[in-house]
Image (cartoon, helix red, strand yellow):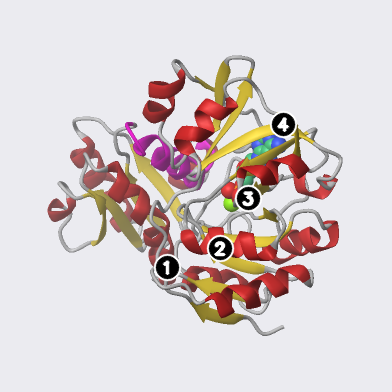
Amino acid sequence: MRTKVLEIDPLNINIEIIKQAAEVINNRGLVAFPTETVYGLGANALDPKAVAGIFEAKKRPLDDPLIVHISDISDLDTLVEEVPPQFHKIVDRFWPGPLTIVLKKTDKVPDIVTTGLETVAVRMPSNVIAKEFIKAAGCPIAAPSANLFSRPSPTTAQHVMEDLEDKIDIVLDGGKTEVGIESTVIELVGERVIVLRPGGITLEELSSLAGEVEISMPGPLDNTPGKYPKHYSPKAKVVLIPDTRDQKEKTLHVIEALGNKGKVFGILAKQEHAADYKNANVKVLGPVNDSKICASRLFGLLREFDSEGVDVIISESIPEKGLGQAVMNRLRKAAGPLENFLNFFHPHN
Ligand code: AMP
Ligand code: MG
C-alpha cells in the first residue's frame, strides 16, 4: 500500500482530512496520528483484525499490550468494568493528558489488545488532532507508538515514515509533538498509585495530588511496560555517563578511548558541557535544569545520530527530576543491559 501523508494544522483543523482518517479506521486500516507525547499508530480497538495490523506493521511481539485512546470519559463504558476509588480525582487533574491508567477490562476489549490480560491500559490524549480523530472514528483507538518495535519513538511525521512507509494507510502530519516522550503508565490498587512506566506526567505531579506513589520495576518475565530490556533504541550503541560531579572528565575519557579504537561516535551532552567536547559530533540534549527540553529532544536526536551512521552514542545522564526520570528510563533502555556495555569495551572477556 502507498502511505498518504496528510498535513493538518492543529490551530485550524481541516475536518475533511479528519474524516478521511476516520474512514480508514472504519475500514480496518491504520492511521498514524500526533498526540502530545509521541506519534501513535491507531486502529479500531474493538476490531481484532484491525489491531492485528498494528502488530504486523510495527513487528511488535504479540505479548506487548497496547494503550487504548479515548476522546470522552463516556467511552470508558465499553472498555472497563469498574474504576477504582481515586480514579476520578486523578483523571479530573490529568486527563486529557500524558497519563495512561490500567483498569479492569470488559469482554468487549479483544484479547489481542491486552495480550490476554484482564486489564486494559486507557488514555485520553490532549492533542487536538488526536481528539478530533478519535471522535470522528467513533470507536476507541488502540495505538502504540508509530515506530518499528524497539526503535526510538517518533516525534515527527518524518520519523513515522522512516519506519512505516508503505506499511500503513495514512500519517496525519501535525508537526513535532510537544512532550516528546511517552505517557506515564499507572495502576490504581485500592488507595495505592503504582507507576509502571515513568513518562509525560512526572512523579512529583502525581504525588502532589495522590500522596506517595510507588514505582514498580518490572522484571524480565513480567507482563508490564519495560519488560523488554532493550527498547527505544537507536541502531548505535549507547554508552551512558553517570550524572556525577566529574561527568565531564569521564565523558572526555570515553571520547579518547573510542577515538583510539577508530570508532565513529557522537555525544549527547548537557548544554552546559557541550562546548568542552571540541572537534566532536556533539548534540545538545538541553539545559541541565530543563528536563522538558531534554524530553522533547531525546528521540529526535537519537534518530539523527542513526542517520549519520555513528557506531556509538556517548550520552550524559541528567538529574532524575521532573521529566528527567522518564528521559533516564528511556536512555537506560536504549543502552540495554549492562553486559552490552561491558562486551563493547572488553570484547574478549
Ligand atoms: P507503547 O504504546 O508502545 O508506548 O506501549 C504501551 C505500553 O503500555 C507498553 O509498554 C505496555 O506494556 C503498557 N501496557 C499496556 N497495557 C497494559 C496493561 N494491561 N498492563 C500493564 N501495562 C500495560
Ligand atoms: Mg512504543
Mark 1 vs mark 4: give the one in front. 1
Q: Secondary structure at mark 3?
A: loop
Q: Which mark is residue 67?
A: none
Q: Where in the figure is residue 182, as x and y percent of width and height?
A: 50, 47
Q: Where in the figure is residue 147, as x and y percent of width and height?
A: 58, 62
**For the residue with label 1, is its CB less than 8 Å from the closest atom of ligand 1?**
no
> What separation in Å lies between label 1 and label 4 (alpha carbons)?
41 Å
Q: What amino acid is at disc 2?
A: Glu
Q: Residue placed at 45% from the left, 34% from the top?
A: 93
Q: What residue is pinned by disc 3? A: 70
Q: Which secondary structure is most common in the magenta stretch?
A: helix
Q: Nearer the viewer, residue 148 or 137?
A: 137
Q: Earlier in the sequence, mark 1 or mark 4?
A: 1
Residue 4 visible in the shown view: yes
Q: What residue is pinned by disc 2? A: 132
Q: Secondary structure at mark 1?
A: loop
Let me know if residue 71 is in the magenta part.
Answer: no
Q: What residue is pinned by disc 1? A: 10
Q: Where in the figure is residue 145, as x and y percent of width and height?
A: 58, 56
